[in-house]
Image (cartoon, rainbow, N blue to C red):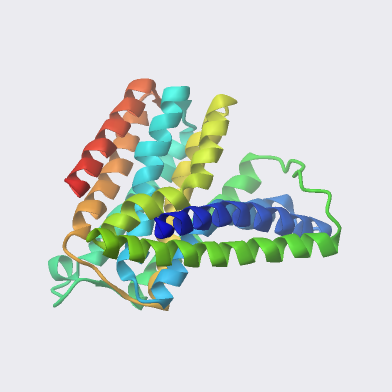
């Protein structure tokens, strides 16, 4: 019971920490006349994925490789099957042409790349499956390319709009930023420690805890953003937030994690890796022709995840 409470506190710390970090850092950046484009591509984009990053870095440093991999892959699966499933039920999602043509295929490519790099004995005649520092460097290389694509897209397709930031003074902004960072660190540690304890208490693997409970907790910012966007009928934001987060999770967060500490890949993780590919592929198939994710698609996503969840705990 104590581990569950610590896990909940950790999730709360992560959510508030990410918000504080984005608010404070955005004010500081704005005060120093950093362009809105740069703030959006770095600070704001980092904000929703900060929980996954912090949890993964702490897991990597503490040698909990199952949590390191499971958190990223589980978050990606939840982002599509749960978050898009729920938001599509609230209001059908219209997808922009660029998202269909480029961003969803990039997310699918990232999922396939992860599966290939994680299966050394299948594709590279390796003696065991491991994601090493070279693999992490490959992820980060493609992430840099993705950032370049986003910068080009932002500059060429959209005029720079006024970015709304909090009315903080520099000292207050610095305090808020540091508080956000502290909450993220403590929240991440609480989540990792409680996840390990829960796995041991219930006799289940760290992998199952990480792809379900931990992943859902770290995906709360994306869930909140997409649900609010769906209610406001800002459907492009709802789906763009999820697809961008999946790319960010795989190429940047997993890349950083395995550069810090290589992780062994258990055979059971291939189920999650394949479902990760299937989620991106299904999303692409559903929106490819009509550029719309409707309520039937959303219900199908939720059903698939329910079957997956049942298979994990049966």
Whether residue 124 sits left or right of residue 264 in the image: it is: left
Counting from the top left corner in percent of width and height, residue 192 is at 42, 65
Which residue is found at the position 34% from the left and 57% from the top? 210
Q: Could you say which is closer to the camera, residue 71 or residue 97?
A: 71
Residue 213 in view here: yes
Residue 109 in view here: no
Which residue is found at the position 46% from the left and 48% from the top? 219
| Residue at the extreme right | 169
Which residue is found at the position 77% from the left and 47% from the top? 165
- Which corner quadrant holds the N terminus? bottom left
Whether residue 171 sits left or right of residue 122 in the image: it is: right
Q: In the image, is residue 71 above or below residue 297?
A: below
Counting from the top left corner in percent of width and height, residue 274 is at 22, 50
Whether residue 14 sits left or right of residue 25 in the image: it is: left
Counting from the top left corner in percent of width and height, residue 314 is at 16, 45
Counting from the top left corner in percent of width and height, residue 122 is at 13, 66
Whether residue 170 sits left or right of residue 95 in the image: it is: right
Which residue is found at the position 55% from the left and 56% from the top? 14
Q: In the rendered image, which quarter is residue 176 located in?
A: bottom right
| Residue at the extreme front | 1
Q: Could you say which is closer to the camera, residue 291 or residue 90?
A: 90
């Amino acid at each position: 019971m104590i581990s569950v409470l610590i896990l909940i506190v950790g999730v709360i710390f992560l959510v508030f920490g990410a918000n504080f970090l984005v608010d404070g850092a955005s004010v500081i950046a704005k005060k120093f006349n950093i362009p809105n484009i740069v703030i959006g591509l770095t600070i704001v984009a980092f904000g929703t994925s900060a929980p996954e990053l912090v949890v993964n870095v702490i897991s990597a440093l503490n040698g909990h490789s199952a949590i390191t991999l499971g958190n990223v892959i589980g978050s990606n699966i939840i982002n599509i099957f749960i978050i898009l499933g729920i938001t599509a039920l609230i209001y059908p999602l219209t997808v922009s042409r660029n998202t269909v043509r480029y961003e969803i295929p990039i997310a699918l490519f990232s999922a396939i790349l992860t599966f290939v790099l994680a299966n050394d004995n299948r594709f590279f005649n390796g003696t065991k499956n491991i994601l090493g520092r070279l693999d992490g460097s490959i992820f980060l290389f493609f992430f840099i390319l993705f950032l370049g694509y986003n910068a080009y897209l932002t500059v060429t397709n959209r005029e720079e709009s006024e970015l709304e930031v909090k009315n903080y003074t520099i000292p207050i902004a610095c305090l808020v930023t540091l508080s956000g960072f502290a909450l993220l660190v403590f929240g991440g540690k609480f989540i990792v420690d409680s996840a390990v304890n829960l796995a041991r208490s219930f006799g289940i693997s760290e992998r199952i805890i990480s792809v379900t409970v931990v992943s859902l907790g770290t995906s709360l910012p994306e869930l909140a953003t997409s649900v609010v966007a769906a209610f406001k009928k800002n459907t492009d934001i709802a789906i763009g937030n999820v697809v961008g987060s999946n790319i960010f999770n795989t190429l940047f967060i997993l890349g950083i994690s395995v550069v810090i500490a290589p992780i062994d890949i258990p055979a059971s993780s291939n189920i999650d890796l394949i479902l990760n590919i299937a989620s991106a592929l299904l999303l692409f198939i559903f929106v490819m022709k009509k550029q719309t994710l409707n309520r039937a698609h959303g219900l199908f996503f939720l059903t698939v995840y329910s079957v997956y969840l049942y298979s994990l705990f049966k």
